[in-house]
Amino acid sequence: MHTIEGHTSFAENLGQLLKRFCPEGLLKALGDALEHIKSTERELTEKAKSKEAESLVEHSIVDTANLEHIVTECGQGLAPREFFELLFEIGSLCLRFGEFRTAKTVFTQIIDEAGSESRFGSVVGRAYCKRAEIRLRQAQWTTAQNDLKRGAQVFKKAKNVEGLAGIENSLGIFATEQGDTKKAVTHFKKAQTGFDRSGDAERSCAALMNLGIVNTIAGQWDEALAYYQRILPQFEKLGKVSRLVELHHNLGMLFLAKGDSQAALSQFDESLNQARFIQYRAFVGLAYLGKATAYARLADHPLAVVFVDKALTIFRELNDRLSIADTYRVKGIIHRVLNHPQIAELYFKTSLRLNEECNNPLNMGETYFELGQLYKDTQQNTKAAQTLKKAVGFFKKVGAQSDARNAQAVLAAVAS
């Protein structure tokens, strides 16, 4: 029987984890200690009634106030294996709720404290994979690669098929971000085979979803849709809301690529509703950005601005620099269409700078294409031609043939 992810807070999820891992005595002692701290400090803060004191209150994305105390107590009260498994689950929870800094700290603690002992190889390898996942999201390519290599060494030593499949999946994501879609396909297919062998149906479907993303980039839309339609009922059967969030987002991106903005909006709404339900902040931001893009194409610029600003707020909180670069590109598109060329150019150039820093060729191609359109609109044909040629080059590099053809058509119009 599969569980269905629901709308529970970070604190509630953390409480459930502690009940799973901690014996009753430890759980009671921990609860009593945290309640004592909370009540004592509440009394003190209530005595500091002033505007200055109120201005010093800081709010994080999730409530992690007691996390360090919990880690300290559980480290002393649990056997090492149970403690490291609990740490891994806490890190994964932080990752889901967008608390990337805390998640990275937790996975690093596992690696530092358990990494030298082979008996903890499984959880150490998974910690390397999760830390690499965070670093991939933040475009820290070199350190992500290093984590994946170390994780692979751990899993090979343990002959862990599922762990190695996870490494292949992450290497596929890395190759996709670097624009090597052929290598990405090879990695995702290896991942899917490994997950099938280990009986992990959810992650097998996730690897197929990644193959759908690569096909979307390549302009092979029917193939991408076939992958998505194949795995949709599987995720529904498994009750994996987080995967359904990702799948509906990817369907939205597919419909955007096909030029069907209304269908894209429907998918982004589905993704957004479910992402809010499980508080999956990264995909709340991506859904906002997708909706902003769709509304920009439908010429509803006020709504596009509202959604792109909501997306930008979340991406800044998450330090997701690639997505921040994307929001600037969408803002540039809005201002280009509204005939604000100077504002649009600044947004495009800022997006380019961030994408160059992150070494993301697909996003660079998309941004050069939009900047070329701006120069064409403002009769700067020489600049337009130079910029569009760069867009074509990047699109060809990543195998985005449909995008390359569109850029070449605009380039031909400029040259004529």
Image (cartoon, rainbow, N blue to C red):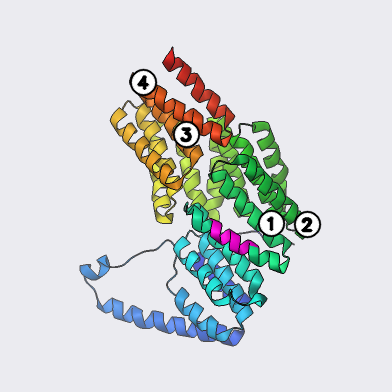
Mark 3 to mark 2: distance in Å?
A: 38 Å
Marker disc for residue 366: 3
Element class at badge 1: helix
Q: Give the range drawn in magenta.
A: 145-152
State how far apart marks 4 and 1 are (Cα): 48 Å
Residue type pointed to by label 1: Ala
Name the amino acid, label 2: Arg
First in sequence: mark 3 vs mark 2: 2
Q: Are marks 4 and 2 in contact (CB under 8 Å)?
A: no
In the rendered structure, find residue 389 and report the number of the disc placed on it. none
Spatial separation of the CA atoms under disc 4 and disc 2: 55 Å
Mark 2 — residue? 197
- For the N terminus, which image quadrant? bottom right
Membership of 151 in magenta stretch: yes
The mark closer to the camera, 3 or 4, is 4
- The crowd level at tag 1 (other Cα within 10 Å; few <14, some 14-19, many 20+) is many
Q: Nearer the viewer, residue 237 or 411?
A: 411
